[in-house]
């Protein structure tokens, strides 16, 4: 089986390249895809670059060109739920694009005709994540992840995301990856470790904790892979 592991930033996939140093690589659409033999399976690893467009392209490439049958996103996010602290982990139960707005036509915020506000992630992959969390004694949150093409660094915007989408964490790629996987019928799981609290200090916190939180997420995904 071919399993896609996708991050957005180089820092989010560097821990995997260190864990799995024997790979071949192929360039497609401005990204490098690393092919890693893994227990009779193959991992296809890449970072997309930041944002919904880049991550949608990478997820599509992994599925349509490299024939990946499952996808796990590993990376960092801003915490919206006060229970989430730096280094904590969240899996998305469902994801939404908070920056979609055609309310002028009477649609709910985040809604696109012939689609839906929220896309559900895969129950079986999330179940594997919960098993790993239990074994490692990790308090894994399952919640709503909101995605959009902005880095959120203000308490007002944070409040707006919670009020309008009941979001627990915010990032810039999960919902686009979710859309691609949903439409192409590929089971997916979006895992994020918290790097900041999406408030006034988010930029400083992000810079300080990106590497650490990316490592936390990658270590968790490695444990998940052993169960797939
Ligand atoms: N990824 C990590 N922190 C984030 C934030 N505050 N906003 C958007 N994406 C993020």
Image: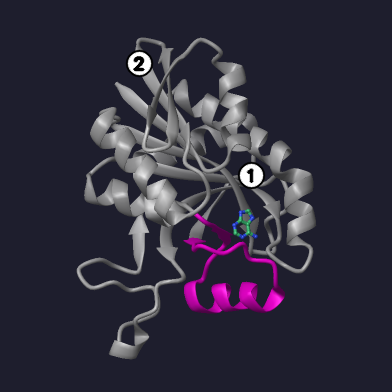
- Secondary structure beneath label 2: strand
Residue at screen point 70% across, 74% down: 155
Viewport quadrant of the N terminus? top left
Sequence order check, earlier mark of 2 and 1: 2
| 147 displayed left or right of 137 | left
Residue 134 occupies which quadrant of the picture?
top right
User: Which residue has dot 2 on it?
Assistant: 41
Answer yes or no: disc 1 within 8 Å of ligand 1: no
Residue density around tag 2, few if under 14, some if 14–19, many if 20 or more, within 10 Å: few
Point out residue 96 in the picture as x, y percentages from the top left corner.
Answer: 42, 64
- Which region is colored magenta? 146-172
Instruction: Give the answer, above or below, for where 9 lies relative to 3.
Output: below
User: Which residue has dot 1 on it?
Assistant: 139
Residue density around tag 1, few if under 14, some if 14–19, many if 20 or more, within 10 Å: few
Residue at screen point 79% across, 63% down: 201
Task: State whether residue 121 appears in this view.
Answer: no
């Amino acid at each position: 089986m071919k399993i896609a592991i996708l991050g957005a930033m180089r820092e989010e996939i560097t821990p995997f390249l260190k864990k799995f140093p024997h790979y071949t690589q192929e360039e497609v659409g401005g990204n490098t895809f690393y092919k890693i033999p893994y227990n009779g399976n193959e991992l296809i690893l890449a970072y997309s670059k930041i944002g919904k467009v880049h991550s949608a392209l990478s997820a599509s490439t992994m599925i349509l060109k490299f024939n990946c049958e499952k996808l796990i996103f590993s990376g960092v996010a801003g915490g919206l739920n006060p229970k989430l602290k730096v280094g904590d982990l969240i899996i998305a139960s469902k994801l939404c694009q908070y920056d979609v707005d055609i309310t002028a036509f009477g649609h709910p915020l985040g809604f696109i005709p012939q689609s839906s506000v929220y896309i559900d992630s895969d129950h079986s992959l999330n179940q594997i994540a919960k098993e790993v969390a239990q074994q490692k004694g990790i308090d894994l949150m399952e919640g709503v992840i909101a995605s959009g093409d902005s880095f959120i660094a203000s308490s007002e915007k944070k409040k707006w995301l919670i009020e309008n989408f009941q979001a627990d964490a915010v990032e810039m790629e999960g919902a686009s990856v979710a859309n691609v996987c949903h439409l192409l019928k590929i089971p997916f799981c979006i895992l994020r470790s918290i790097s900041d609290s999406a408030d006034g200090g988010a930029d400083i916190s992000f810079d300080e904790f990106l590497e650490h939180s990316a490592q936390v997420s990658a270590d968790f995904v490695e444990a998940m892979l052993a169960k797939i």
